[in-house]
Amino acid sequence: MKKTLLPFLFLLVINVNAQEQIPTEKKELINSIESRENELIQLSDKIWSLAETAFEENQSAKLLADFAEKEGFDVERGVAGIPTAFVATYGSGSPVISVLGEFDALPGISQKAMPTKEPLKEGAAGHGCGHNLFGVGSLAAAIAIKDMIEKGEIKGTVKFFGTPSEEKYFGKIWMVDAGLWDDVDVNISWHPGAKTEADVQSSLALVDFKIEFFGQAAHASADPWNGRSASDALELYTTGVNYYREHVKPTVRMHYHIQDGGQVVNVVPDYSLLWMRVRDTKRDGLMPVYEHAKKMAEGAAIMANVDYKVSLISGIYETLVNREGGKIMQNNLELLGPIQYTDEEIEFGKKIQKATNKEMVGMDSEIKALEETKEHPGGGSTDVGDVSWNVPNINLSVTTAPKDTPWHSWAVVACGGMSIGHKGMLYAGKAMSMTMLDLFKNPEMVEKVKAEYKERKGDAVYESIIPDGPPPIPDSEK
Ligand SMILES: [Zn+2]
């Protein structure tokens, strides 16, 4: 009996010590979030099941906004001309610290909360980027800070930005354009992931544009000489793009999606439509490639003897990293320690890895050391980039899926609807609220974060890559 009890007691002591390192005020934040744990999980699960896509997140946005309102926030809905964008504010005066939450899903990857591929609803959307967790985790952080302002323990303003349509069109660019971050001192953001770290890597700048070709229809066999093919032009254009790849810098990425290449085989198509995307590490490198890729449409149109039109869809900046902010976040991750998983959760993770042909190593929640900031980070893009050019931004990544999980896939959807995702979401809320509290309590930290922002931005002037007119809200949502 004694032999087995001793190691148990030893473990208990270690755990108590780790907890005691967390200052009382930060424990209050943790308690705020834990006291609402069930409600927050329910909220996330509802958004997970709704799985609403870009600019159509009506119920998801309403759920988050209503929750904030019930907690005493002032909520302004339908900001920046977007019905599903909103700002929830609590408190007054400075500092103004904000956190942003996404909530849009991805089409076609519906999945049950189970470790083998099985759609919840065939062909429907799913939260393959974990944005159900993103929105609720950020709101949890804002609420914990609200509690402290309410109790008079800190002074200032906390804002939660409900930011729709990250996966398509990049909703934040219209919100930035409306000046919504103009009075904010520091913004915090996170993203669900397969590891936990204070994120000090940038993301890629990109521009999206569409190319339309207009020809003349004719019978494909009886009188093709009367036809001018819009799909010939499209094929010539993409062939040109694929030759062009050899003559751009290795940091450039180009992708296209044929959205309309004609309807039937026996008609010479009079219309075609291509969605084109160009990316590079920085916006400066991006724009010349974009200009050339636009010009190439004219060449394709001349060859196929058709008309053409190029229209900007939208575009985003690379993210301005903030290492000073990253250090504050890092300190809080170390205070919290890694997320602990049950045997069942580890088993769930391994089954996901088996189903996606990855090494069956389970979860990775180890707190990574603060990395060097890479000059060419690779990877994806995010409209958090545009926010980061207008207000200092601190980024976090938290484990919500097993190691090496393919992103934007059914596997991420599965984890986001069960306890692995929930744990990451609550953890992110805690880490972000602790970082926000540091900023509320220490004006010198805010100054350091701002100074780095100014230095990194330098003389560059932010110019959004935004089309004329209102945001592209689908007609069904207007
Ligand atoms: Zn995402």
Image (cartoon, rainbow, N blue to C red):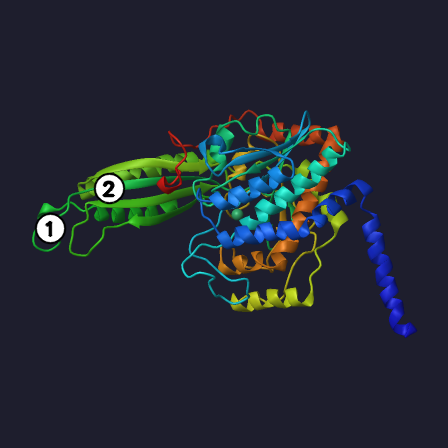
Which of the two labelled residues, at mark 2 and mark 1, occupies the earlier sequence position? Answer: 2
Give the left or right position of residue 293, taking residue 417 as reference.
left
406 displayed left or right of 223: right
In the depicted view, which residue is nearer to us: 56 or 275? 56
Residue type, numbered disc 2: Phe
Residue that badge 1 annotates: 224
- Residue where numbered disc 2 is placed: 213
Picture quarter with the N terminus:
bottom right
Q: Position of residue 246 (x, y in %)?
A: 38, 47
Q: Residue furthest right?
A: 2
Residue 350 appears left or right of 367: left
Q: Quadrant of the C terminus?
A: top left
Estimate the x, y position of residue 380 in percent, counting from the top left: 50, 47
**Residue furthest out toward the front:** 70
Q: Is residue 466 above or below residue 349?
A: above
Q: How many numbered discs sit on the rendered protein?
A: 2
Q: Which secondary structure, mark 1?
A: helix
Residue sticking out furthest to the bottom: 1
> Residue 222 in the image: x percent, y percent?
7, 54
Mark 1 crowdedness (10 Å alpha carbons): few <14, some 14-19, many ≥20 = some
Please tell me whether residue 40 is drawn above or below residue 350 in the rendered image: above
Quadrant of the rendered structure where residue 468 is?
top left
Residue 155 in sight in this render? yes
Q: Secondary structure at mark 2?
A: strand
Residue shown at the point (66%, 55%) measured from the top left: 423
Q: Amino acid at mark 1?
A: Pro
How packed is label 2: few (under 14 Cα within 10 Å), some, or many (20 or more)? many
